[in-house]
Amino acid sequence: MLALGLWDGSLSKSAAASPETNSPPPLTRAHAHNDYEHTRPLLDALDHGFCSIEADVWLVDGNLLVAHDRDKVKPDRTLQALYLDPLRERVRRNGGRLYPAGPPAILLIDVKSDAEATYAALRELLKEYGDVLTVFRNGSVQAKAITVIISGNRAATTMAAESVRYAAVDGRIEDLESNAPGSLIPLVSD
């Protein structure tokens, strides 16, 4: 994946802290790749100010489970528990933003299982978080604290046909030459 900054967990907390507030400045060009492999998924990235965070997701028995490999999924490591609930709580605590006075953030969901079935489950789950997630409605964008972008096995055609979505599509190189609107494909990370 192309990214301007990939985090491997080596950045010390003191290096990221703002001296005035002892909280990290938002790092708009930093992406926490495979964030769920850290000791504290999501929280380590947030403690360092990351504005883009990735979670790999498998649909297993109707549950959206976070892991890179299918044989590593655990029933208690759901997308909701590790990412969506803590993100919502933080956004509410910060008056509608992930970081106080900070920019919007990206939650990149890398779908590892079947594109269509997984997106169908994601669609239903993401609707529950419409208060904090960017909404794409008939080509317009209602930006909120967090924009979800679906990567990996993408149900791009299905998503393009929806009049209301709570996620956008991670594009591929060939999408650079397409007429797909930025409201559908805001990112190309092939």
Image: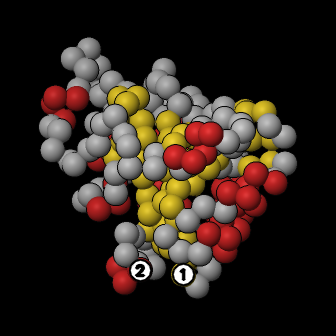
Q: Looking at the picture, how far across and down is residue 95, in whole percent?
A: 56, 29
Residue 73 is at least partly visible in this image: yes
Do the residues bearing badges 2 and 1 touch, measured as CB atoms within 8 Å? yes
Assign a secondary structure to mark 2. helix
Q: Is residue 149 visible?
A: no
What numbered label is drawn on residue 70?
Answer: 2
Nearer to us in this view, 177 or 139: 177
Q: Position of residue 84 (x, y in %)?
A: 53, 54
> Which mark is in front, 2 or 1?
2
Q: Residues within 10 Å of mark 2 (few under 14, many from 20)?
A: some
What residue is at 47 percent from the left and 24 percent from the top? Answer: 102
Q: Which mark is residue 100?
A: none
Q: 117 left or right of 69?
A: right
The residue sitting at 30% across, 27% down in the picture is 23
Residue 73 percent location from the top left of the image:
40, 78
Count the labels in the image. 2
83 left or right, relative to 49: right
Instruction: Please report the residue visible at 42 percent of the width from the left and 36 percent of the height from the top.
Output: 51
Residue ID for mark 1: 60
Q: Quadrant of residue 67?
A: bottom left
Q: Quadrant of residue 22?
A: top left
* x then y, percent, for residue 57: 49, 67
